[in-house]
Amino acid sequence: MTTHRHGRPDARPQRPGNRSRGRALALSLGLILAAAMTGPAAAGAAPPGPAHSSGLGANVTVFDPGMPVGDIQAALDAAYAKQVDNEMGTARYAFLFKPGTYGTTEHPLQVRVGYYTEIAGLGASPTDVVINGKVEVYNRCLENGGTSNCLALVNFWRTLSNLSIAVNAAGQDGCRGSADFWAVSQAVSLRRLNITGANLSLMDYCTAGPQYASGGFIADSRLPFVVSGSQQQWITRNSEVAGWSNGVWNQVFSGVVGAPAEAGFPNPPYTTLATTPVSREKPYLFVDGAGRYQVRVPSARRNTQGVSWANGLTVGHTLPLSDFFVARPSDSVQRINRELARGKNLLLTPGVYDIDRSIEVARPDTVVLGLGHATLTAVGGAVPLRVADVPGVIVAGVTVDAGTEESPVLLQVGARRGHGWSTVADPTTLSDVYFRVGGPHIGKADTALEVNSDNVLIDHTWVWRADHGVEGLTDTQRWHTNIGRTGVVVNGDNVTATGLFVEHFQQYNTVWNGEQGTTVLYQNELPYDPPTQADWMNGNVPGYAAYKVGTRVKTHRLYGAGVYVFNQNNPSIHTANGFEVPATPGVKLHHIMTVNLSAGTIDHVVNGVGGPADTTKVGQPVYVVDYPAS
C-alpha cells in the first residue's frame, strides 16, 4: 500500500495487508447486519425516491435530467443506506440515467455505491450522460463503532458503466476533494467511463487504516491519472489513462493507451500487453432519440488498443428491447425457456431467481443481460444456466449462486468438448459473470464454470467459494459443508480469459485442458479452511495448484498471475506448487508469483521452480518472471 501525507498518497509502496484478516472481521460484522436487515430492503423492495416508469422491474430506477437533484440524491442515499453493509442480503438495485447532465457546480450529485448496485448511463456514448459530482466507494470501517480498521477487502458486487464523471467535490472535505474514490475488491467492474477533473483513486486513503484493497477490473474507459495505492492486483483493458501511480503485487494492462511500460519486473510489478488478443465489450442498454430502449451489442475485436467509442458508436449491432423477454424473479424457468425458444433474448431484472431446472440458451447470438447483479440460485441441485454448442451467445451481468443441494456445475458452456459449432469471429462471451458457493447460505457445487465449446471469451469473472458468510459455520464445518471442488474447467480450444479471478476451491481452482488458451491476469487465493494436510492432498502431492494446465496441452499463454496462501484453519499445511503446467516450449507463463498472507506455505511457484512463500516472508511475493526461462 502507499503511505499518506495530508490525505494524499505518496509514491512509496509499502507491504500490503492481509485481506484475509479483513474478511474475518467482516464475518462478525456480517452476522450482526444480517440480523438487522429485515423488512422490505431484505426482500429486495425498491428504495423510496423518484422513479421513471420503465418496464424494467420494481428494483430499477430511471432518472432523467429534469428531476430535482435533491430528489435524485435522496433516492440514491436511501439505497446506499440499505446496501452499504448488506453483503449477504438479497436486495438488488439498478439506477439508470437518461442522457443529460446531473448535478450543478453548486449542488453536485454525490453518488455512493453499495452492495449489489449498478449505476449506468443510458446514452449511446459514455459522453451522453454526465454526472457533475462524484460516484464513489469508500472503505468499510469495521471496529469501534465504524471509526477504525477501515479497508476495502470485502467491497464486492457493484457496477459502474457508460457515463461521464466531471469530478466536483463541492461540500466535501480537503482529502475527499483530492480524487474520485473507487475502493473495491472482486466482482466490481468499471466499463465505458469518461472521468475528468481529478484523479481516480482505487483505494480510500481518507479513512483510518489499514486501507487495504484487493483487485478489480476496468475496460473501455478514458481515465485521468490513476492512484493504484494499496490495490494488490488489477487489470485494465482497452482503455486510456493519463498516468498510473504505483503497483503492489500484480498490475496488468492490456491494450491500454498511456499504460506504464513493462520494465524491470517485479519492480515495478507491471505486466503490459500492447494490444488485447481478443476483446468484446459488454452489451449495454441505451435510450434512442425517440425515447425507446435499445441494447447495443458490440462486435468482437482482435489485437486492439484503446476505447471502442473513440470514433463514434461502438462497432456492433442494436437490438430493440422488444426483442428481449424482460424477466422478473417471480418468472418460472419454464416461462423463461419458452420465451428463449420463441427466439427472444433475455433481460434479467434485479433480484434473486430460484432456478430449479436449467435455463437453456440454444440459439446462436442470444444475449442474456442482467441488471443490478441479477442472481440465479440453484435449487435442488440444478444447473442454473446451460449454453449450447453455438456461436455468439453473450451472458453478461449475471451472478450464479450454488444452492444447498449439490449441483454438478453452475454454468456450462457447450455440452461436449470440441463437438459444437463455433467461430473465431463471433465468440461466445461471458462478461461480468460471477459465481458464489456459500456465503448467504450453505452452497454446494462440484464445478462452478465449465467451458466445453471452442472460441469462448471470458471477460471478467469472479469465481468464489466463500471464505466467510452468515451460515454460522466454523472453518472446519465450512470445509465439510460448503462444497466447491473446482472453480473453472476449460476444455474448449482457443478460449481467452481477460480478468480471471478464482478463489478458495477444494481441489484445483482452475483446470485448463483446451489448446491455444490465453489468460490475461489470473488471481487466486487457495482455500483458507482445510482442517489437516490429509484433507489437502492430491494423491501423494501436498495440495492442489491454483492453476493447472492439462498434461497433454501443447500451447498456452498466461500473462500476470498471482496465487496467495492463508491456511488460517491449520497454518502447518503445505501446497507443493502455485502453478502446475506441462514442461513444453509452447506453454509459457509470464510474470507469475506466489505470496504468503500469514499462514501456510506454498513450496514453489511453478513445477518446483521458485522458493517457498512461507511465514518468513509474509506479504513478500516470490516471483518467476518467465516459465520456462527464456
Image (cartoon, rainbow, N blue to C red):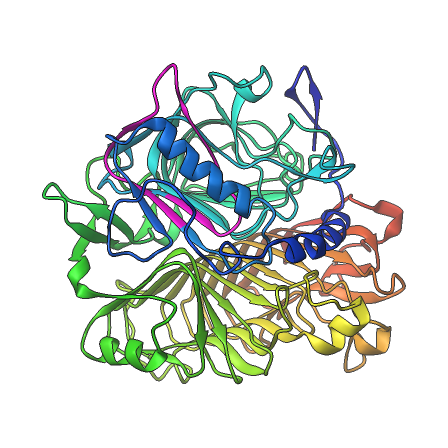
Q: Does the magenta stretch include residue 114?
A: yes
Residue 286 position in % (x across, y down): 23, 46
Q: Quadrant of residue 304?
A: top left
Q: Which residue is drawn at 85% across and 73% down?
A: 533
Q: Does the magenta stretch include residue 429?
A: no
Q: Is residue 136 above or below residue 282?
A: above
Q: Nearer the viewer, residue 70 or 39?
A: 39
Would you say residue 495 is visible in this rendering? yes
Q: In this view, does 187 lie above or below 607?
A: above
Would you say residue 421 is visible in this rendering? no
Q: Residue furthest front?
A: 39
Q: Which of 58 and 304 is in front in this view?
A: 58
Q: In this view, does 381 lie to the left or right of 620?
A: left
Q: Is residue 145 above or below residue 186?
A: above
Number of marks in the image? 0
Quadrant that contains the N terminus: top right
Q: Nearer the viewer, residue 477 or 411?
A: 477
Q: Is residue 75 left or right of residue 66?
A: right
Q: Give the range drawn in magenta.
A: 94-119
Q: Quadrant of residue 412?
A: bottom left
Residue 182 position in % (x across, y down): 53, 36
Q: Is residue 143 above or below residue 469?
A: above
Residue 177 position in % (x across, y down): 53, 18
Q: Quadrant of residue 232?
A: top right
Q: Which residue is drawn at 24% across and 73% down?
A: 364
Q: Which residue is drawn at 36% across and 68% down?
A: 455
Residue 243 position in % (x across, y down): 49, 26
Q: Which residue lies furthest to the left in this view?
A: 290
Q: Which of 457 and 384 is in front in this view?
A: 384
Q: Which residue is drawn at 50% across and 17% down?
A: 171
